[in-house]
């Protein structure tokens, strides 16, 4: 099925470091969403972006809707152990399909 | 607790068998979505129901089917199971037909042996 390309695939960082991940597509999207999945749980919505260029924060998380509408970025500042999990981007296409990225697996070491 | 309830949490079954996964959406949500997540894979959209009617179809195999009942709960039926069907199956719900974010349940882990 169609998926977005997310990078990096995985990250191993030390507590306190900042994290950046991105999502790219060959198609344009009307909405970008970022989800986090804890082990054994379903994804939980972190941030939603509705227009090109938009920059939105949720605590230590900041996400941006790329100007080309084909990409989005998520930054996590001053990481803590509970940031561990899989981060998924999702884009809503012009045909209203919600397509998920391949995920970025984040490990935080104390 | 997200408000989306999925049962059972775990299911182990043999190849060739049939299973039914159940989902109760969040109160007030009319849409139910089913996703499959295989090991180390992203989320693959299977199917969406809105208020009892099928609204969108993704990469759902012919051996799989779903329905949404009048009380809005949904069931995903998987038949003639193969080893490759082993995965996490998530249900999500939203208020309308097209929403900006879904609420996911905690999933059913299906293991086919």
Image (tube, coloured by chain):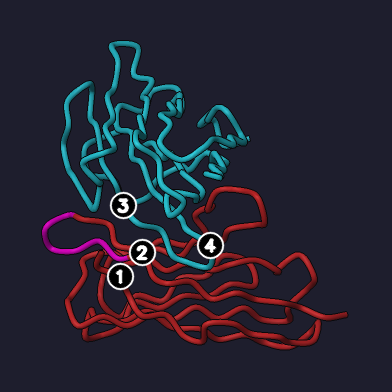
Sequence-first tag of 2 and 1: 1
Mark 4 surroundings: few (<14), some (14-19) or many (≥20) residues within 10 A: few
Mark 2 surroundings: few (<14), some (14-19) or many (≥20) residues within 10 A: many
Q: Which residue is mark 2?
A: A100
Please tell me if label 1 and label 3 are on a single chain: no
Residue B101 image point, x, y percent? 37, 50
Give the quadrant of the C terminus of chain A: bottom right
Q: Secondary structure at mark 4?
A: loop
Front disc: 3 or 2: 3
Q: Look at chain B in the picture and name its colour.
A: cyan
Give the extent of the magenta segment.
A91-96
Q: Which residue is mark 4?
A: B39
Chain ID, red in image: A
Q: Which residue is mark 3?
A: B45
Q: Are marks 2 and 1 in contact (CB under 8 Å)?
A: yes
Q: Are marks 1 and 4 in contact (CB under 8 Å)?
A: no
């Amino acid at each position: 099925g169609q998926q977005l390309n997310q990078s990096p695939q995985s990250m191993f960082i030390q507590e306190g470091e900042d994290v950046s991940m991105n999502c790219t597509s060959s198609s344009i999207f009307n909405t970008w969403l970022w989800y986090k999945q804890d082990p054994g749980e379903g994804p939980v919505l972190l941030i939603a972006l509705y227009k090109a260029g938009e920059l939105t924060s949720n605590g230590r998380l900041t996400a941006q809707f790329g100007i080309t509408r084909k990409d989005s970025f998520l930054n996590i500042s001053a990481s803590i152990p509970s940031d561990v999990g899989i981060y998924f981007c999702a884009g809503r296409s012009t045909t209203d399909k919600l397509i998920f990225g391949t995920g970025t697996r984040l490990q935080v070491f104390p | 607790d997200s408000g989306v309830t999925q049962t059972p949490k775990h299911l182990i079954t043999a190849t060739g068998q049939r299973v039914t996964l159940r989902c109760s959406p969040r109160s007030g949500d009319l849409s139910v979505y089913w996703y499959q997540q295989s090991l180390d894979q992203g989320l693959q959209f299977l199917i969406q129901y809105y208020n009892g009617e099928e609204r969108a179809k993704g990469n759902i195999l012919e051996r799989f089917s779903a329905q949404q009942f009048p009380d809005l709960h949904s069931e995903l039926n998987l038949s003639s199971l193969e080893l490759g069907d082993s995965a996490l199956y998530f249900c999500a719900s939203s208020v309308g037909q097209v929403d900006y974010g879904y609420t996911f349940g905690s999933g059913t882990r299906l293991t086919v042996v």
